[in-house]
Image: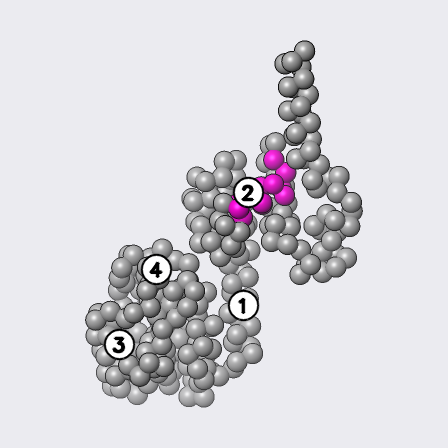
Amino acid sequence: MSNNGDTVSNQSDILVRDRLIREMESGERPREKAMKHGIKSLSDIELMAIIFSTGLKGKSVIELSREILADNRNHLSKVARLSVGDMLRRYKGIGPAKALTLLAALELGSRSAADAAKIDQPAVTSSEIAYQIMKHHLEYLDHEEFWILLMSQAGKPLREVKIGQGGVSGTVADVKLIMRAAIECLASSMIVFHNHPSGTLRPSTQDDALTRKIVEAGKLIDVSVRDHIIVTDSSYYSYNDNNRMP
């Protein structure tokens, strides 16, 4: 009798989990709720549930979404840092399709925010505007990357170019490649960027030397280097704002 009772109890638990979507009031289901009240009415868990569409065997899509968020301290930004491999290793039952779908949605949201910054601020007139345009390339990385933002004479963004990628504590930035990109784009000015995965905002002596080198090279082709911005996951450091541009 005891074994049968345990079996019934286990089956009941599974039914409770599985009914979270099926047996919700229609107005509470994520899709119906979004249709009625708008997509912004959904919680992070509900949005993730719509992206995943289905759960796993013995686990509803709501539970799956809640588990992933809880494992990342309920920060979508931490989920966005995961690779497909990370998700496959950490969440049993998730396949490449689900992992790619979620990460693609998060990346699309990040790019949308960057694009909104460009529309709202057509000219780059401050380090904050430049940071908002470029941060989606550089935050939440576990390695260093070097990017440039090329601009017109009026200060409007022309192109974002990745110059190099390195390890945890350094990256390669070939000055010749930087200048070639500026010439090809017919840019009048640029802002250079790299990230510090460690979270420190303090420029290194190598950062200072590279900044001087890029500024001097820019003078030769009449392209002004307006700033060098260091990006972390939560903030940024501007050479120009701190009067450190050569």
Dot 3 and dot 2 residues touching (CB under 8 Å)? no
Residue drawn where x is 51% and y is 63% of the image: 110
Q: Amino acid at mark 3?
A: Thr
The mark found on residue 113 in the picture is: 1
Magenta region: which residues? 59-70
For disc 1, the neighbor class at 10 Å (few under 14, some 14 to 19, many from 20) is some
**Can residue 66 be seen in this snapshot?**
yes
Depth check, mark 3 against mark 2: the one in front is: 2
Q: Quickly name the residue at label 4.
A: 197
Dot 4 and dot 2 residues touching (CB under 8 Å)? no
* SS for dot 2: helix
Q: Quadrant of the N terminus?
A: top right
- Report, in whole angstroms, how far the alpha carbon at label 1 lies from the one at label 4: 21 Å
Q: Quickly name the residue at label 3.
A: 211
**Between discs 4 and 2, the one toward the N terminus:** 2
Residue 67 x/y as whole percent:
55, 42
The mark found on residue 67 in the picture is: 2
Dot 3 and dot 4 residues touching (CB under 8 Å)? no
Find out whether residue 223 is within the magenta segment.
no
- Report, in whole angstroms, how far the alpha carbon at label 4 lies from the one at label 2: 26 Å
Q: Amino acid at mark 4?
A: Pro
Residue 191, by quadrant, is: bottom left
- Report, in whole angstroms, how far the alpha carbon at label 3 lies from the one at label 2: 44 Å
- Report, in whole angstroms, how far the alpha carbon at label 2 lies from the one at label 1: 26 Å
**Can residue 184 be seen in this snapshot?**
no
